[in-house]
Image: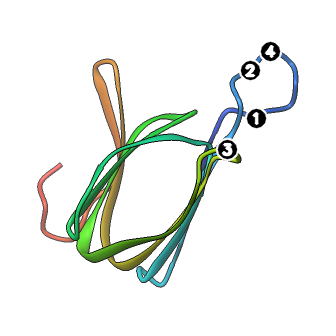
Amino acid sequence: MNRAAGSGNGSGTAPGCSITIDRRRTAALTGVTDVESFDDRMVVLRTHGGRLILTGSELHVTALQLESGRLQLEGTIDGAAYEGPGRRRGWRKRGQDA
């Protein structure tokens, strides 16, 4: 699954960000500006696309390079949601109300 915000094309838009989740076991993110918090069930990030919350179980940050905005994550990934002023968007684990 890929999600992207901003194009980073130099035309005055915000730098881009992306998330790639492979088989719900690993995630590779770009555009990460800060890690607000993390434990084995939730990772809360600031990205160029907004605040991003990843949920799951046995989550582990395996690589973090804030200088280049990259983060890698392993575990069972159940959900991902971007938050912003007055909005929430993303995907959630099965059976969870919207």
- Position of 21 with respect to 45 (left or right) is right
Q: Which of marks 2 and 1 is nearer the N terminus?
A: 1
Judge depth for marks 3 and 2 and give the one in front.
Answer: 3
Name which of mark 3 and mark 4 comes first in the sequence: 4
| Residue 2 seen from this side | no
Give the numbered dot on residue 7. 1
Mark number, residue 13: 2
Asked if the residue at tag 1 contacts the one at tag 2, i.e. Cβ–Cβ closer than 8 Å, the answer is yes
Distance CA(mark 3)–CA(mark 1):
19 Å
Q: Is residue 52 at least partly visible in the picture? A: yes
Q: Quadrant of residue 94?
A: bottom left
- Quarter containing the N terminus: bottom right
Which residue: 86% across, 19% down?
11
Between the C-alphas of marks 3 and 2, the distance is: 20 Å
Distance from disc 3 to disc 4, alpha carbons, whole Å, reads 21 Å
Q: Do the residues labelled 4 and 2 touch (CB within 8 Å)?
A: yes
Q: How far apart are marks 2 and 1 (CA)?
A: 7 Å
Query: How busy is the neighbourhood of tag 4: few (under 14 within 10 Å), some, or many (20 plus)?
Result: few
Distance CA(mark 4)–CA(mark 2):
4 Å
Residue type marked 2: Thr
Dot 4 corresponds to which residue?
A: 12
Q: What residue type is labelled 4?
A: Gly
Residue for badge 3: 67
Q: Quadrant of residue 75?
A: bottom left
Instruction: Kindly identify the residue that appears in the image at 74 percent across and 20 percent down.
Output: 13
